[in-house]
Image: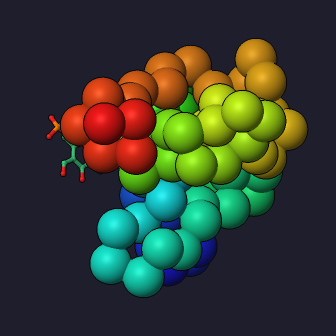
Amino acid sequence: MRAHLARKLRIGRAQVLITDGVFSMDGDIAPAGKTLRHRGKYNCIMMIDDAHSSGVLGKNGRGTVDHAGVHGRVHIQVGTLTKRLA
Ligand SMILES: Cc1ncc(COP(=O)(O)O)c(C=O)c1O
């Protein structure tokens, strides 16, 4: 998967790198720190969908960015009010 991601970024097709914070099927947590290394290397925008992470991960449920300690390095963090917070 990591090689696939690197290949996509290298050939310049992917300009926005998007990942879930927590994947709903198995509850896997995205390796945000590792993924950010790709973002920096290929200079793309990074977005985390925290639909399943808001209210769950991080201090007081602040989400994946807080959980991974990568404040200020993720361009877009989105959540929803329909899951944990509901
Ligand atoms: C990862 C993810 N992002 C966003 C959404 C959309 O959430 P909502 O139903 O609150 O629009 C969902 C819904 O299941 C989701 O699983």
Q: Is residue 74 visible?
A: yes
* In-front residue for pair 27/48: 27
The residue depicted at 68 percent of the width and 61 percent of the height is 31
> Residue farthest to the front?
86
Residue 75 pos. (x, y %)? 56, 19
Q: Is residue 7 visible?
A: no
Q: How is the image coloured?
A: rainbow
* In-front residue for pair 28/15: 28
Residue 28 pos. (x, y %)? 53, 74
* In-front residue for pair 10/21: 21
The residue depicted at 78 percent of the width and 36 percent of the height is 59
The residue depicted at 85 percent of the width and 38 percent of the height is 69
Q: Quadrant of ligand 1?
A: top left
Q: Is residue 19 above or below residue 69?
A: below
Q: For this view, does 7 lie left or right of residue 82?
A: right
Q: For this view, does 46 lie left or right of residue 78?
A: right
* In-front residue for pair 85/28: 85
